[in-house]
Each structure stands twice: as structure tokens, then as C-alpha cells.
Image (tube, rainbow, N blue to C red):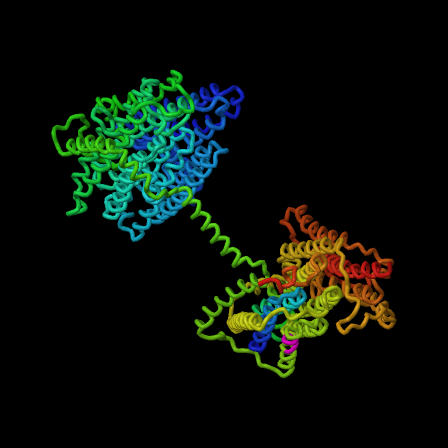
Amino acid sequence: MELLVALIIGVLVATGVYLCLRARTFSVVLGLTLLGYGVNVFLFSMGGLKINQVAVVGASADPTDPLTQALVLTAIVIGFAMTAFLVVLALRSQGEQHSDHVDGQDGEQRS
Amino acid sequence: MMLPAIVLLPLLAALLPMFTRHLGRRWCALLVALPVVAALGLLAQASLPIWEGGMQQWSMTWLPSLGLNLALRLDGLALLFCVLILGIGLLVVVYAHYYLPAKDDGGRFYTLLLLFMFSMLGVVTSDNLLFLVFFWELTSLSSFLLISYKQYDSAARKGARMALTVTGMGGLALLAGVLLIGHVVGSFSLSTVLESGALVQEHALYPVILCLVLLGAFTKSAQFPFHFWLPHAMAAPTPVSAYLHSATMVKAGIFLLARFYPVLAGTDLWFYLVTAAGMATLLWGAVWALFQHDLKGLLAFSTISHLGLITLLFGLNSPLAAVAGVFHIINHATFKAGLFMAAGIIDQQTGTRDMRRINGLWKYMPYTAVLAMVASAAMAGVPLLNGFLSKEMFFTETLQSDQLGALSWLLPLGATLGGVFSVAYSARFIHDVFFNGEPVNLPKFPPQEPPRYMKIPVEILVALCVAVGVFPAITVAALLAVAATATLGGTLPEYHLAVWHGLNIPLLMSVIALVGGIAVYACRRRLFAWYARLPEIDAKRVFEGRIQAVVRLAAGVTRGLQTGSLQGYLAWVLALVAAVLVWQLPNLASVTGERAMLPVDGVSVLCALMLIAAALLTTVLHRQRMMAIICLSVVGLIVSLIFVRFSAPDLALTQLSVEVVSVLLLMLAMYFLPARAKADSNSLRVGRDAVLAVLIGTGVAVAALLVMTTDIATISPFFLENSVPGGGGTNVVNVILVDFRGFDTFGEITVLGIAALGIYALLSDLKLVSAKYDPFGRPWAHDAHPLVLVTLSRPLLPLALMIAVYIFLRGHNLPGGGFVAGLITSVALLLQYVASGVTWVHKRIPGDYHPLVALGVLLAGLTGVASWAFDAPFLTSTFTHVHLPMIGDFELASAMLFDTGVFLTVVGATLLILANLGKLSLLDDKKETT
């Protein structure tokens, strides 16, 4: 199971990285979201994987690590806020420069 | 306290002209002269123990952890330099009063001069190496300002820049050298370092240290091949040249050689480096001095030559040579400062410094002529003057040295040759200026004697030359003895200061130098003709050219890296990450740890495959926005399933609701962005990015696998054990968020609020044009609010809100809490926006969400502050059990209040972001209708 999760993390990070390197803002937003998923699962997995052992006192015999969960929980929310910020930055750039290229202008004239 | 007072008095004096400059130059000069006199008086008093072989020290701890203390020391060597700096400084202050042009009030000049004096005193009295370097840099800076005193003059600016560049680079080398010394010795205290000579010289880093320190010394003292800045520094006003470029600043490098003599000298490397540099400088300066037609140029090259002579003496590794070097420091400072002042007088009286035009001044200013001639004779090493004594010692020492083996005769030969040219240029200074026919076309004619008091500093210096030359034993012997003792670090060799040593080889060398020099001068016309045919090398132009080339190179590198392409920058950063992975990953013995893996089941594999497929599809289809969003949401949903599977219900709830909000956000954004993107990247770039992505993905996956299968001691048991007794809740995740790590959460909701406000600011006044057609050219439907959705969504709202309240209330004990409840509430409200439109919603609820964000952060903050009222630290929580009729027994924790703050912030921020984004399309529609 750990191998499976590691594979998922690897795919999420790889696709995220690839999309972050694209030239259009929307692709970068997609990439950052995927990278965010990957990083969240990565952080979460640092506490070790346990099945049916929720971190509620009295509910499980060998509760899983609650600390990484607490970290990831806020990371999810802040990740959303940052994605939103990036989206709006992309919109602003589109509104002012009339291009959705990450450099604010279309790439053809660049070397 | 006397030592800091001596150093600080000039700094105090540097401030005075600020207040007195409107009173005129006379007051400025007088007011800055007084503190200098006072400092001299203090120095006299502070020097009392030194004459008896003692030393004065003062220190104050500043940054002891860095080894940086404000420490001063006054020993013989420092005393000698203090006398030179303060004594000649005082004379220059007086001289400058008469030298500066009438319209100059002297305020800036005196401030800079005194600032320089302060830095020099700091250099020579520092007892801490870092402190020394600090003052060293200060001398570079203040001399830069002094050289460029005539700011309107391009030559002055260029000369100053050159001096600063060269000496500044030397200063950096010195700093590096000093840091290495500190590393080797373990202390930056000069007193400790001076006793650690053997330690330093045996260390493997000794050659590096030596080269770095010598770089500092050679650049400052204009040693070959760094000599070229000094002639161009002559663009400075003459009092500055008299002060900086004869007596003080250029001697700072020599001071460094003398100061570190016990630490660094005595090795073969020292001998070769220092002697070679000294000899090259001595000859180079002496020869070219003869060919300078500029009066100050001649003096500048002669200074270079004399500095080379002193360096050479220190390089000989013989105590007697070091004594001679110290002696020549004194002698050179006196006669050269006098000569510069005389040159300044001539310049002022004739309006030019060109020796081809200045001739026969003996007739017009005989008094100045006598002074200048005596000083020149001292420079040439004529008997009965001070220069003769040290030169004689110099000749003796070059004869004594046998470190070059069979080639030892080179040293006396070079020394004699230097002597010959030194006599030749001195002869030119005397004959060409004061005799040799009549003046040619002088700008000011006829020249006259300068004001009476302007000559006093020159008279004092020339009198000293004669007094030392005739009666060395009663004038200079004591000062020389203490300075040389301090230089050598203890014992003084036996030497004899006398005018007459009998008929010996050094005397013969002196005679050869005198006769040969006059002979060389006699055939000057042929030499000048030869010189005129030489290709002209303008050091300034070469230097500026090199600097420009360096700047061009730097600009080229910057252009190459700073392409303005964000993709490029990101690729560089990621490539570095990938490089580290490629370098380190193969070193792993195993990619799994010792813990056994959980068994795999079919559903998990299926979900994982779906996620992988969806993630890859998102990547492949990223240019088709709608498809990409759909695939992305599949990924997000399966991620929340992962959280469900691995015992993280809180995360699953959060992820699920965030997923909804995120997809809404992306849809809104897509509305304004081009629906389909062109393929920008060529296959090469796609390949590069794919390689980077695979490398980094693999690295992260391996790291995750390794950690997951390794047993690690964590701090989590603490939270599990203390959740109920300490936080009053059984849902440990929530207790951590609102109680144990409440401060973190507080910071996080603040960030959330700030991000929301930032988005609001970015969206204000933003005008976007949405596409009127879909990618296939069909116009968007105008059925904005489908009836089914509207009808279904309205009853959903109270239900969703009720669930949010439930999730919120149970959060402390069961999965849920402020974050999740806030997100559910947001989703419920957003559904209304989607179904019925912004206008409809804002008619019913206030659409202004800033106060909600503020209220949430404030509430969470106040909950924290409230614990102060109970003398508890910020965000201490408390809880109690309450019994309510009908509902029963339940727990009330102050953390609930905090969680309410979290709830409000999340709701406010989410709606602030999305509602404002939604409003954009409203504006767009309005534009369309009008």
C-alpha cells in the first residue's frame, strides 16, 4: 500500500512540475494544484499510513499520527487561498497585458 | 580612556566645520587645528610608559561572540605613526588654509581631511584585526572623497575611482587574510596574533594568508604592479597629496608590513614576494620619475620608488633592515610632505605644474627655493640630511643579504641603480624648476613668495630633515628605537646612527649614486627624446577600459541568465533540485525501510489507477481547459478518498469541500482566459520539462516511500495523551489546531484573510473581456440560471447550514471543526451564487465579506488575548462541562470561541474571493448590454 501511495505522490509531483513549467497561466494553475495535492499527500504520509485508526481518543486502539493531519488540514485551506491568488494574478495579467503567457507577453518574440 | 580620546578627537573635529563654515576658512582651520593639538598633547602624555618599554591598551567588548572588540593599543610603532599622522596633519591643516582657492570656505575639505585622520589613527592603534580592517576601509573611502575633492574635474573623479577600486580590492583581500589569521590563531586580538608567529607560519594556510595580507599592503602602498593608481591620485588638492600620498595613507600598507612583521616575516616566501615587489617598485618609480614633466607627477613616482625601498627593506628578513625601514618611513614622510607643499606653493604662484614651463624661479622666490632644494637633497640622499642616513643603512643592508645565493649582488646593484635615478630626478626638481633659464609663458607672472605663514609648515619639515640629518642621536633615536622594537616584537639589534661611518662600500655606493645621478640628469635631453618616442600608455584609459570590459562581461552574464522568462528561471531552480536528486539518489542502499508494508486491496489499486490516469490526462489535456478541470477534480476527489482510507476524516472533509470551491474558482477563471491555448513549447522544451518532472517526481516518491516504511519516533504520542486532559476534546486533530498549536492556526487564518484581501485589491478596477463564443465558435447560452438548479438549491441552503453547525459543534470531539464547517457554509452559499446569480444573492444577504474576515481574525485574536486576564500566556484555553435542559451534558471550551474565529475567517475569505470573481462577469455582462 505504501508503494501505491508513493507512486501516487510521484505522479502528482511529476505532473505538477511539468505543468508548472508551461507557458500559459492556466496550465500553471493546474500544475500548482496538482503539485499541492502531491505535497499534501506527501506531508500526510510522513506520519505513516494506518487503516481505520482515526486520531480520536477512545475510538481506536492505535491512533494514527494527528500532527501531520493538523498540518495538512491548514495546508489544504491555505493552498486554496494561494491558488486563488494565483488565479486572480493571472486574470489581472490577462486584463492588463492582454496575454495569458506567464511572462505577460506572448513567447514567440522571445528567444 | 586616553587612547579612544586621541582617536576620537579628529572625528569630533571633523564635525566642527559644519557649524563654522559660514564664519570663513580661518575659523574652520583654527577650530579643527585645536582638537588635533589636543590629541597631540594627549599622545605625549599617553606615550610616557612607551619610552620605558611599555605599552598602552584599552578595550571594550562589543561582539565578543564574533571576536570583535573595540580594542586599541599604543606601542612604539603605533606611536610613531600617530606622531606622523597628527603632526603632519596639523601642518597640512595650516598649509591648506593658505592653499585652498579664495572662494572655498574649506568646510568640506577640513571635514574630509579630519575624517581621514581619524581613520588612519584607527588603523595604526587598533588592537583587534577586524577593527583594523574596518578603519582600513574607512581610509579607502575617505581618501576617495579627498582625491575627488575637485568634483567638477573628470580627471579627479577618475583618479579617485581608480584609487578606490585598487585599494578597495586590496581591502577585501586583507579582510580575507585577517579572517584566515583569526581562524588559525583562534583570536582576532592583535596582541595574541603577534605572539603566534610560529603557529601561523607552520600552518598550511600560511602562503594564502601571506598573499592576501600582502595584496592589501601592496595595493595601499602602491607597490608594483598596483602602483598605477598613485600618479592619478595626484588630481587631489596638493595638501591632500602632501598628507595622504607622502606621509600617511600610502604608508598604511607599509604599516601593515611592519605590524605583521613578527607574525608573517622570516620565511623564504616573505623574502621573495616582498623583496621582489619592493625592488621592482623602487626601480620602476625611480626611472619614470625622471621623465615626468608634471611637478606632482615626479613626486608621485618618487613616492612610489621610496615606498618600494621601504618594502624592500622589510622584505630582507633582517632586523637591521627593518630598523632601516622604520627610519626611512620617518625620513620620507618629512621630506616628501615638505616637497609636496613646496610644489603646491609653486603651482599656486605660477599657475602651472609643468616643469617645461617653470624655470628659473630662484630669481622670484629664493626663500621657497632654498626650502625645496634642501628637501630635494634629502630625497636624493645627500649627506647631512636625513635621507642620507636611511639610504646609507639601506645600502648596507642590501650588501649584507645573502638570501639570493650567487645572485646576491643583484640587490646592491639594484639599490645603487635606484639611488642613481633618485639623485637624477631630485636634481631635475632642483635644476629644472629653480634654474635652467627663464620661465616659459607662465599663466601667472611674475611669481612671488607665498604668504609668510604658508611657509611655516614647510620650514618645520625641512628643519626636521636637517636636524635629523646632522644630529640623529638626539632627535630621532628614541622614537626610532621604540618603533623598531615594537616592529620587531621585542629585541632591538645593535645599530649606530651616525653621519660618518668611515670609508666603506655603502659610502662608495652613495658616491656612485650622486655622481651617476648627476650624469644621468646631464644627458636628460637624449633621454627625454627617447621617452617621447615610447608608445604612450595611459594607465587611466587602460584601467577604465578593463573596468568597462568587466562591466560588459557581468552584463552579458546577467543577460544570459536574466532572460525575463519565468519559465526559464523555474526550470533552473528545478534543474538544481533534479541535479541534487541525481547526485544523491543512487547512493541510497534501499528505497524501503524496515517496516512491513500494509497489504494492498483491489479498490485501492483501482482508485490509484484512476488518480494516476486523471493526473496524466490533466497534463495531456492541459490546453483544453474544461477537460483539464474535470480531470483535475477527479484527482482531488480521489485524494480525499486517500484521506478517508488512511484514517484522516478531517482531511477528507476539508479536501472535499475545498475541491468544490477550487473547481468553482477555476471555472470562473476559465471564463476570462482563452479557452484553448496554443502549443508554445517545442519538442525540445517538452522533453526537457518531462525529464525534470520525472526526476523530481521519482525523488519525492522515493523519499515518501522511505519515510513511510521507516519507524520514526514522533512527538505525536504527547498530543494523543494530552488531548483530553489538556484540551478537553477527543478529536486530537482539532485540539491540535485550536489549542496546542493555536498560535500557528491564528497565523494561518491571518494569511488566509490577507490573501483574500489581496485578491480583492487585485480585482478592483480590473476590466476583462470574456469570450463571447466557445472554442467551436458557438455563442454561450443565455439561460444563465437553470430552473432545476435554482429550485433544488434553495431548500439545500438551510440543510447545508444545519450540517455546518453540526460539524462545527462536534468538531472538538469528532471529525469536523471550524475549517470544515466554514468550507461547508461557503459551499452552501456559493451554490446560491451559481444557481441564482450574484445579483439575486446580494439582494438577500450583504455581499460585503471584508468585515467577516476581520471579525474572524479579531475574534480568534481576542480569545487569545483574553487568557492574559487570567495571567495565562496568549491563547491558553480552558474548558468546562455545562448541563443544558433538553440537550444534555456537553462541554464548553474557550477553544470553541477560537474555532468560531477560524470559521468566520474561512467563510469570509472564501466568499470574498469567489463572490468578487463572480462579480467580474456581472460587469462584463453590463458592458455588453449598454
Relative to B471, does residue A8 appear above or below in the rendering? below
Name the residue: 19% across, 39% down. B398
In this view of the protein, which residue sits in the foreground, B464 or B384? B384
Q: What residue span does the magenta drawing correspond to? A: B613-617
Horizontally, is B675 left or right of B195 in the view?
right
Q: In this image, B343 relative to B476: left or right?
A: right
Quarter of the image that includes the N terminus of chain B? top left
The image quadrant that residue B727 belongs to is: bottom right
Q: Was residue B369 drawn as part of the magenta stretch in this picture?
A: no
In the displayed structure, A32 sits above or below B127; it is below
Where, by quadrant of the figure, is residue B447 drawn? Answer: top left
Magenta stretch prevailing secondary structure: helix
> Is B226 placed above or below B371 here?
below
Residue B77 x/y as whole percent: 30, 33
Question: In the picture shown, does residue B60 fall above or below B350?
Answer: below
Which residue is at a point 40% across and 23% down the rendered structure image?
A: B350
Considering every residue shown, the one lying at the far left of the view is B503
- The front one of B544 and B772 is B544
Percent coordinates x, y for residue B322 in the rendering = 24, 36
Asked if residue A104 can be seen in this view, the reply is: yes
Residue in the foreground of this view, choosing between B103 and B391: B103
Residue furthest to the bottom = B602
- Give the percent coordinates (x, y) of residue A36: 63, 66
- Location of residue B202 in the rendering, given as x and y in whole percent from the top left corner: 26, 50
Q: How many marks?
A: 0
Relative side of B428 to B684, left or right: left
